[in-house]
Each structure stands twice: as C-alpha cells, then as structure tokens.
Image (cartoon, rainbow, N blue to C red):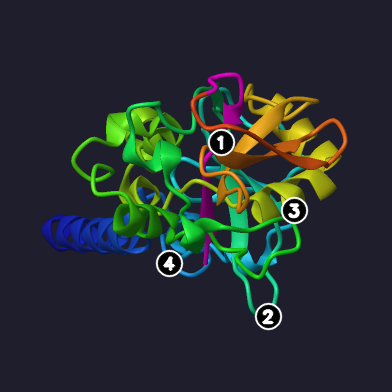
Amino acid sequence: MKKHKWFAALAVMVMALAVAGCSNPSSGGSGNLSGAGNSGVDNPVSQQPDYSKCVVGDFVLKDGTILSKDKTPESGTVAAVIVRAATNDKPALGVGIVHKKMAWCTESAEGYNTNITALQGDITSDYMDGSDGWEKLKEACSDAESNPEKYPAWNYSLTYAKNNGLTGDLATGWYFPTVAELYTIYQNKTAIDTSLSKADGSTFGTYYYWSCCQDPSYDDDARVLFFSSGNMTNNFKYSDSGYVCSVRAFN
C-alpha cells in the first residue's frame, strides 16, 4: 500500500514540473502567461519603425528605432533628428547630429570652375531632393569619383555613416542637402536645435551651411544658407568657413 502511494505522489510531482516548464519556455519556467516577455507584434522593438508618424524633432536612434522629441536620449545613441515630417509625396527627412566646417571643393577640383547646371537651385526650387546630387556631380566633373577628397563637403556627407559608426539600414542613404532642404530645416530650427542639443549634437544656431547647389551666375560659387536669417547667398567653393551637415530620408 505504501509503495502505491509513493508512485502516485511521484506521478503528481512529474506532472507539476511538466506544466511549469511548458507555461513559458522563453522565461525558463517562470509561469508568465501574459505574453509580455515574448517577442513578436506586441514588442515594438521587433517591428519595423513607422517613420511616417515621426514629427519634427523626434530622434532616430542608432538601432533604427524612434524616440519622441519629448524624451531625452541616452548619450551616444542618436543617429539623426527628424527635420521634416512625411507628407503624401515626400518621406520623413532626418539630419545627422555631427556637423563640420569645410570647403565645398578645392581649387584644384574640376568642379571649382565648372557651371554644374544640373545642380542649380534655390530655396524655392523644384530641385528639392539632393539624394542624386553626387551622381549629377560625377556626370559633370570627371575627377569626382576618382578623387572625392577634392570635394570635402560632398565626401563628408556621403561617408557620414562610416565616420559616425552607423550600421545596418543606417549605413547608406546619407547625402549633401540642397539649399531648399536646408531652408526646410531653417523653418523648423528651434525644435530641431532643441533635439540636437539633447543628443549632444551640433546645433545650427546662427551659422551658415553649404548646400550642394551651384550658383547659376558664377562657376566658382555655390549656394549657402544663413541660419541666422534664412537668407540664401553664394560663397567661393574653396572657402572652408561654411558648415556641412548630412541628411537622409526615412521611409
């Protein structure tokens, strides 16, 4: 009789252990049945970020996720700040948080004395999207592809991801903005600078920034935008007193 009771008790213990072990395999048998610890659609980190819902000032983190502009990101985690919310015909646009001062091109570059008509534009121009600017420059200037160091502002924008440790989807797509895109940033400068400051990044302040746009009247001039006033003017391409930022579409 005692032997039968011992076997019955053992069977109950085995069944209890089996149920506990199967209740939540990913939690090591913790018995959590809520699904909160499981990956999948309930976990926002596992989802593709919906950049179409971003507002100006939101952060794009280095892992591709989105952080509200109302939050303060951890140091070293931000890849970009949203400078233009998505519209029906344009994706959200973000700017890299590190800006540097340098020349548009050197005096030895072919592009210094070339009127690059495909790159002409102003703050109201239809040439809004600068993502194909490098291709237009290469078509006009034979030394651009083989000697990108002769085009410092361009080269900085194009290699922004590599120089700032961005990987995965964020490793590509960065480019030198048009003056119209810079003007969009100027129109939202207060919110953008607030977020850039939170991310320990470079703020636009009252500096002037190079655009990828050629001045139509002078071969050796390119368009710049003053962030103190929003005014567009021109400067000698070899001047290293202008700042450069890199932008990227998020869609």
Residue 251 image position (x, y, % from top left): 52, 67
**Magenta residues, start to end:** 239-251
* Quadrant of residue 205 within the rendered picture: top right
**For residue 17, which quarter of the picture?**
bottom left
- Kindly identify which residue carries mark 1: 245
* Label 2 CA crowd tier, 10 Å (few <14, some 14–19, many 20+): few
Using the numbered discs, state the Cα–Cα distance from disc 3 to disc 1 in whole angstroms.
13 Å
Q: Is residue 71 visible?
A: no
Q: Find the distance from the CA under tag 2 to the CA under tag 4.
A: 29 Å
Q: Where is 207 relative to 144, above or below?
A: above
Question: Which label's residue is closer to the chain start, 3 or 1?
Answer: 3
For residue 17, above or below residue 156 = below
Q: Secondary structure at mark 2?
A: loop
Taking 51 as reference, is 101 above or below it?
above
Residue that mark 4 sits on? 40
Task: Give coordinates of residue 181: x percent, y percent.
Answer: 66, 54
Gap in angstroms between the C-alphas marked 2 and 1: 25 Å
> Which mark is on residue 184?
3
Question: Looking at the image, which residue sits at the far bottom?
Answer: 88
Q: Earlier in the sequence, mark 3 or mark 4?
A: 4
Q: Amino acid at mark 4?
A: Gly
Q: Quick check: 7 above or below 233?
A: below
Q: Secondary structure at mark 1?
A: loop
Where residue 207 sits: x, y (%)? 74, 25
Disc number lying in front (2 or 4): 2
Q: Amino acid at mark 3?
A: Thr
